[in-house]
């Protein structure tokens, strides 16, 4: 009877179900968009989450102003053979990238840059003893490429590689840096040591061991790992997903009002029919079931169609953002699709409650008299 009654007013029923379709697509698509954005950001932070940074404690009393070679050896021993330890030196020096007057720039000296940097052009040597590595932003600004000549401290040197964009080493930028061998600075101390662990858990364990052994008597060094940063990113995107779901829910609320209107109109138009049903023995609960079945049926049909289009939309989002449409079928995405479907059916059910109650409580005599 519910299917028959909905079929009487096809256009009106289709428009009501279309509201559910749009609401389900809005919730599921926005949820999948938030997950895709989170996946894209966290993927870029994977390498950073595995890093531990050791620096002199600037706020501590009797803290060293730099990290000695002996302390670097201690860090290597604590980190173990599975981790990559890269000491960094930092210094300002006159640099000329375009044969013009030199400008003072921050430079970083690294013995083994291949452990923390990646090249977009050229090759980063394992045994870094000559040449320079240049960030991509500087390379584009000054039209540099592997083999180009630059001047550092009045000495001409060759560019060995252009660093890959978008990353950071510790908390140092890579887009506009100049990296040189440690022999160019002629100093035996380091401003920072970066430990690259196998994964975030190993990085956290290494950081705890470094804090315990390097600062056994006083806080001489600051040891930072990025586990808290990863947690903050997760919490931020969780809040973003809830916000996006709230926006999508507005569409379903509008669809619920549309279904409420359709059901109320159906109750008014079928008042005489409802009176006949009550007169021949239908109970209130029977009329209630019929009217609620119509509302739920609209929600189920709209929800199924919305789920199909949501998966298509999720595939397009992942294709354009991550270049992999199949990532739309991750289990997390199905959570949002199922939530959107359940919300659509639930909204339809709630929208049909008042019209169903109104129809079930119609007096048969009054309904027949109409």
Image (tube, rainbow, N blue to C red):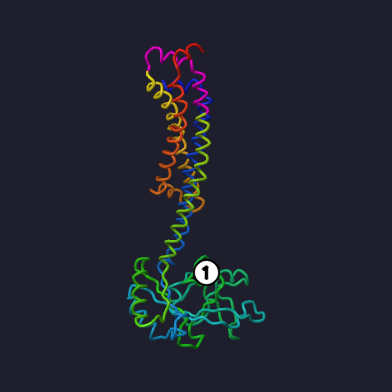
How far across and how far down the image is residue 101, in percent?
Answer: 67, 81
Q: Residues within 10 Å of mark 1 (few under 14, many from 20)?
A: some
Q: Which residue is mark 1?
A: 121
Residue at image location 48% in from the left, 72% down from the top: 123
Q: Is residue 49 left or right of residue 320?
A: left
How far across and how far down the image is residue 360, in percent?
Answer: 43, 22
Please determine whether, in this image, residue 307 is positioned above or below residue 2: below
Q: Is residue 191 magenta?
A: no
Residue at image location 40% in from the left, 45% down from the top: 335
Which quadrant of the figure contains the N terminus? top left
Residue nearest the observer in this picture, 90 or 326: 90
Please determine whether, in this image, residue 207 is positioned above or below residue 314: below
Q: Could you say whether the residue bearing mark 1 is in a helix, strand or loop?
A: strand
Residue nearest the observer in this picture, 58 or 116: 58
Residue at image location 46% in from the left, 33% down from the top: 302
How far across and how far down the image is residue 111, in percent?
Answer: 45, 80
For this orientation, the residue located farthest to the right is 100
How far across and how far down the image is residue 142, in percent?
Answer: 63, 72
> Residue 278's image quarter?
top left
Does the magenta stretch mainly form a helix, a strand or a loop?
Answer: helix
Q: Which residues are magenta?
A: 261-282
């Amino acid at each position: 009877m519910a299917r028959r009654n909905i079929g009487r007013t096809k256009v009106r029923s289709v428009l009501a179900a279309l509201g559910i379709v749009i609401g389900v697509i809005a919730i599921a698509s926005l949820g999948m968009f938030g997950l895709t954005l989170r996946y894209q950001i966290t993927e870029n932070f994977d390498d950073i989450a595995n890093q531990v940074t050791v620096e002199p404690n600037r706020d501590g009393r009797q803290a060293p102003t730099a990290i000695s070679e002996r302390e670097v050896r201690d860090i290597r021993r604590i980190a173990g053979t599975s981790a990559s330890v890269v000491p960094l030196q930092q210094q300002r020096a006159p640099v000329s990238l375009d044969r013009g007057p030199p400008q003072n720039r921050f430079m970083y000296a690294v013995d083994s840059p291949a452990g923390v940097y990646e090249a977009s052009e050229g090759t980063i040597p394992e045994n870094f003893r000559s040449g320079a590595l240049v960030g991509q932003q500087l390379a584009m600004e000054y039209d540099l490429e592997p083999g180009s000549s630059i001047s550092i401290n009045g000495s001409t040197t060759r560019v060995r590689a252009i660093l890959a964009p978008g990353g950071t080493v510790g908390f140092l930028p890579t887009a506009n840096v100049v990296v040189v061998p440690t022999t160019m600075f002629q100093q035996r101390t380091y401003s920072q040591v970066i430990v690259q662990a196998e994964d975030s858990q190993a990085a956290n364990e290494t950081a705890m061991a470094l804090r315990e052994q390097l600062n056994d008597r006083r806080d001489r060094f600051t040891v930072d790992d990025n586990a808290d940063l990863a947690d903050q990113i997760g919490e931020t995107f969780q809040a973003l997903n809830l916000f996006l779901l709230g926006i999508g829910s507005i569409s379903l609320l509008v669809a619920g009002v549309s279904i409420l209107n359709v059901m109320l109109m159906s109750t008014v138009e079928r008042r005489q029919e409802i009176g006949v049903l009550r007169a021949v023995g239908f109970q209130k609960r029977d009329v209630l079931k019929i009217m609620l079945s119509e509302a739920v049926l609209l929600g189920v049909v709209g929800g199924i169609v919305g789920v199909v289009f949501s998966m298509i939309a999720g595939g397009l989002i992942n294709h354009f953002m991550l270049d992999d449409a199949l990532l739309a079928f991750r289990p997390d995405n199905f959570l949002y699709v199922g939530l959107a479907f359940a919300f659509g059916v639930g909204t339809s059910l709630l929208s049909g409650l008042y019209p169903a109650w109104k129809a079930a409580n119609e007096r048969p005599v009054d309904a027949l008299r109409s």
